[in-house]
Amino acid sequence: MTQDEAFAILKTGRNVFLTGEPGSGKSHMVNRYVEYLRSCGVEPSITASTGIAATHIGGMTIHSWSGIGVRTRLTDHDLELMLDKDRLVKRLRAARVLIIDEVSMLSGDTLAVVEQVCRVLRDSIEPFGGLQVVLVGDFFQLPPIMPKADQERVKTISLDGEDQWSPFAFMGTAWAKADPTICYLTEQHRQEDTEFLKALSAIRRGEVTDEVRECFAGRRVEPAVADDHTKLYTHNFAVDKLNDARLAKLPGERRDFAMKSEGAPTIVEGLKRGCLSPETLSLKLGAKVMFTKNSVEGKFVNGTIGEVVGFSPVTGYPQITMHNGKTIEPELGEWSIYDGMKMLGMIKQIPLRLAWAITVHKSQGMSLDTAIMDLSQAFEYGQGYVALSRVRTLAGLYLLGYNERALEVHPDVFAKDIQFRAASEKARYDFAALGEEQIADLQLQFINTIGGAVGMGMQAPAPKVSTYDATAELVAQKLSVADMAEKRGVTEATIITHLEKLVANGTLDPAADLEYLKPERRRFVTMQAALEKTYKKKGSMLLTPAQSLLGPGFTFEELRVARLFLGKTEDPSS
């Protein structure tokens, strides 16, 4: 299925499982759908299975969003306590579309608890409380780890198997209730090496022939200069041992950079566990490093390799020369989880880690130009596939060794993948048979049903007042952003999106209509300086760089409100 075909299905409001091979554009599709919903005045609930994955998509963990924490079972008493949490109930009842990224890292039991909470707190008998649910991921990635409590429970499961743990989300009851339309993306945007793509696809399909083995055997070579390439190992101890030894051998003074954090301890700890940058980053001149997140200015991406060539005399931060010859000084990176305008947890660290070696598990989500890997001790299904698919081309792969397990995928995932592919093809043809006019009607009906409006000049037939006009009426009543959100039953972020559009199209004048929402003068002047600094550099006022300049005392939503008064607001639907 192409991205455009999947996008058309998403817009109809169907529950969807968006999947595909690494590099097929799953993250791009999520961003595209989020932008579309926001252009219609609908703020989606964006979540992921892990804290770090949540920061990558600008959301929060599904555990925090749903209020379940680490639990995979809920009693009636637990649900009663959750119903007493006004903020949690308000968040779930205001939701319209729920996106769960990296769903492969959620067990069937965890997804079932999320589904149960949505029904109970939204007071609905519909699956997931009537939300459109968009599940995103690739089950060929490393599977979820069974919680210790469940490990003990499974040891004593009943003979009829009713209490058996569901390791994969698609095995659980919630998946069946959601009955998602399968959108299996088939376009490839990461690897351009046909032979390599063919070999990786063969592993996914369980068709590891002698030809595939010969393909990888041909890469059982060591590079001329091994230090130029990152090594992937299956065990943490091998990674730590190599990185520590290589750093110790370098001459010169060691510089240590401590991670900063604030917020709820449990959320902060979750972010730390998932963050590729360590709590204490130790560097020396000549250290081989890897960037651990994407630069908002496009200077580097997660997985970019470089070398420490100096330390700034002003900030003390490391100066990194990359393979393209450019030298940059990275600023502190931020990984944070927000609930509307409230920051739940945040960590800050220079977005680097030592890169002589990295574990296969930590490499998930990266794209590497070259890598040396030893898969001779691969012990888990999918480990080899994850490691091999990190590299863009076969020429960039240096394979020191591998065992047969490294070329195997989980048999349950393999069997289910066959069904996913077939279901995706069926969905593709079924939707095409509806015709463009009927599909467009379904898309319009869905947006109208969840309180949005499609298109710049297209007014939804119901309700009679557009979602933007309804917000404008509340502005006339001088309601705060929080009060408007509560009255409309949407998030504060959605209200601010409405204000941006209303200012952009001339319906509202910030000076005349929104003056009462303007931040306190001192804070506004501070935010104005930061936003104008980003404007001079990029030609538009960017929130993430501005917040990096300001620090954790200023939120994205607060910056969005301040930006309304600076004359650089763009129409969010354009």
Image (spheres, rainbow, N blue to C red):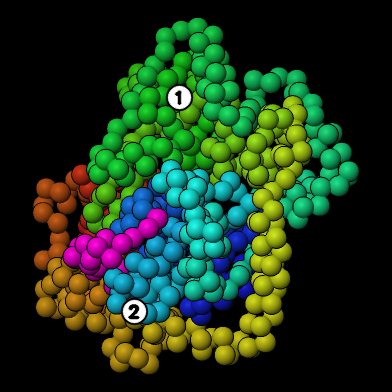
Residue to which mark 2 is pinned: 124
Q: Residue at x 61, y 86 (%)?
A: 436
Q: Amino acid at mark 2?
A: Ser
Horizontal placement of 361 versus 21: left or right? left
Q: What residue do we see at 30% from left, 43% from top?
A: 266
Tell me the amino acid under the disc marked 1.
Gln
- Quadrant occupied by the C terminus: bottom left
Q: Quadrant of residue 520?
A: bottom left
Residue depicted at 36% across the width and 53% down the height: 71
Q: Tag 2: Cα neighbours inside 10 Å, few (<14), some, or many (≥20)?
A: few
Above or below residue 464? Residue 511 is above
Q: Secondary structure at mark 2?
A: loop
Q: Is residue 83 magenta?
A: yes
- When the figure is inspected, residue 566 is found, relative to residue 147, above or below; the finding is below
Q: Quadrant of residue 424?
A: bottom right
Q: Position of residue 415 (x, y in %)?
A: 70, 60
Q: Residue at x 44, y 64 (%)?
A: 112
The residue at the far top in this view is: 251
Q: Earlier in the sequence, mark 1 or mark 2?
A: 2
x, y percent for residue 447? 42, 81
State yes or no: residue 463 in magenta: no
Q: Taken as a whole, is the magenta stretch helix, strand or loop? A: helix
> Circle 1 — which element?
strand
Decide if residue 200 is on the left or right side of residue 280: right
Name the mark nearer the viewer: 1 or 2.
2
In the image, residue 79 above or below residue 365: below
Quadrant of the image containing the N terminus: bottom right
Residue density around tag 1, few if under 14, some if 14–19, many if 20 or more, within 10 Å: some
Tell me where the magenta segment starts and ends, as one range: 72-93
Q: Nearer the viewer, residue 111 or 265?
A: 111
The numbered mark at residue 319 is 1
